[in-house]
């Protein structure tokens, strides 16, 4: 399994949000780190085919991002995901499954399986408006997994999670990353330093660091902050 991003570029008026990015990803967890405005969301939307690039390509095992076959292989949790507050967790998953064209019987089975995986089985019948931030986030991940994606893209999934939720989230992602490609974005180093196999650090639409990070290289947080130091006084 290989995701190949080749010279991917996206510009909004005079702002180049993603600037000729090239990278090859195999299975594992990738932590996309960058300050606000670095281009993380734009990159993720391009990888999910929600946004069309100005130039460059994205392929998963030779399938182009613009194809139905590619779409069938990905799961996406956007930053501001719209949950329906009066739906129960189960209703919501069945609704999302219908949108994804999954047959009813299969959808019910898969929804139960996923509610178990994200530890929401007991809350499946409760309305989403009564869910905590972490519970909503786990439900969001469950909907992204409905079609058993080979590529899972999560935009700032750790926002608003309490410490206990974080541990649970980390374990879940590590499990999914064993067999799939997972890309998750954040601007907080501690959210990903123990969960990502590979760090992708973004600034001004480009990767300024990509690779594994181990403690012998020093403190990732210090390194990260140093990259943005010149912006502190702006
Ligand atoms: N629809 C748009 N129209 C114009 N400019 C945009 C648009 N979307 C993003 N931008 C700009 O492109 C740049 C990258 O934005 P992007 O949202 O990808 O960054 P980000 O790293 O995800 O930041 P955040 O953490 O705030 O979501 C920013 O300068 C942003 O203002």
Image: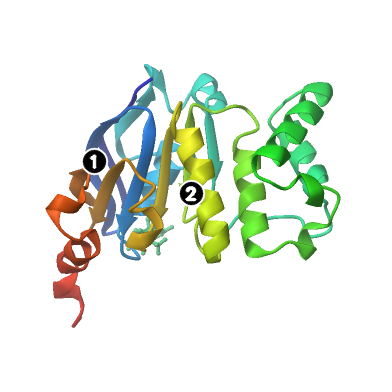
Q: Does any atom of ligand 1 lie closer than 8 Å to the CB of label 1?
A: no
Q: Are marks 2 and 1 in contact (CB under 8 Å)?
A: no
Quadrant observed for ligand 1 in the rendered image: bottom left
In the rendered structure, find residue 47 and report the number of the disc placed on it: none
Residue shown at 51% from the left, 57% from the top: 166
Q: Place residue 130 in its image quadrant.
A: bottom right
Left or right of 42, for residue 115 = right
Left or right, residue 223 beside residue 193: left
Residue 105 makes an appearance in the image: yes
Secondary structure found at label 1: strand
Q: Quadrant of residue 107?
A: top right
Q: CA distance from mark 2 to mark 1?
A: 27 Å
Which quarter of the rendered picture does the C terminus lie within? bottom left
Give the numbered dot on residue 21: 1
Neighbour class for label 2 at 10 Å: few (<14), some, many (≥20)? some
> Compared to 198, does 34 lie above or below?
below
| Side of 43 relative to 207 (left or right) | right
- Quarter of the image with the N terminus is top left
Secondary element type, mark 2: helix
Q: Is residue 12 visible?
A: no
Q: Which colour scheme appears in the figure? A: rainbow
Q: Position of residue 67 (x, y in %)?
A: 49, 22
Kindly identify the residue that appears in the image at 14 percent across and 73 percent down.
Answer: 230
**Residue 60: quadrant of the picture:** top left
Query: Whole-percent x and y of residue 209?
Result: 18, 49
Note whether 126 is above or below 229 in the view shown. Answer: above
Which residue bears the numbered disc 2?
A: 170
Where residue 175 sits: x, y (%)?
A: 50, 35
Kindly identify the residue that appears in the image at 52 percent across and 25 percent down: 73
Q: Nearer the viewer, residue 12 or 94?
A: 94
């Amino acid at each position: 399994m290989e995701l190949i991003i080749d010279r991917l570029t996206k510009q909004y008026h005079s702002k180049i949000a993603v600037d000729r990015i090239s990278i090859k990803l195999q299975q594992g967890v990738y932590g996309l780190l960058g300050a606000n405005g670095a281009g993380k969301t734009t990159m993720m939307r391009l990888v999910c085919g929600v946004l069309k690039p100005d130039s460059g390509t994205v392929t998963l095992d030779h399938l182009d991002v613009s194809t139905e076959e590619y779409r069938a292989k990905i799961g996406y949790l956007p930053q501001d995901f719209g949950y329906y507050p009066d739906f129960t967790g189960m209703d919501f998953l069945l609704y999302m499954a219908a949108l994804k064209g999954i047959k009813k019987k299969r959808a019910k089975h898969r929804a139960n399986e996923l509610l178990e995986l994200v530890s929401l089985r007991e809350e499946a019948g409760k309305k989403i408006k009564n869910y905590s931030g972490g519970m909503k986030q786990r439900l969001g991940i469950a909907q992204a997994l409905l079609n058993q994606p080979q590529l899972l893209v999560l935009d700032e999934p750790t926002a608003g999670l309490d410490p206990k939720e974080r541990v649970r989230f980390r374990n879940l992602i590590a499990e999914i990353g064993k067999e799939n490609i997972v890309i998750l974005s954040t601007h907080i180093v501690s959210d990903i330093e123990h969960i990502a196999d590979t760090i992708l650090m973004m600034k001004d639409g480009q990767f300024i660091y990509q690779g594994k990070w181990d403690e012998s290289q020093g403190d990732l947080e210090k390194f990260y902050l140093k990259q943005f130091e010149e912006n502190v006084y702006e």
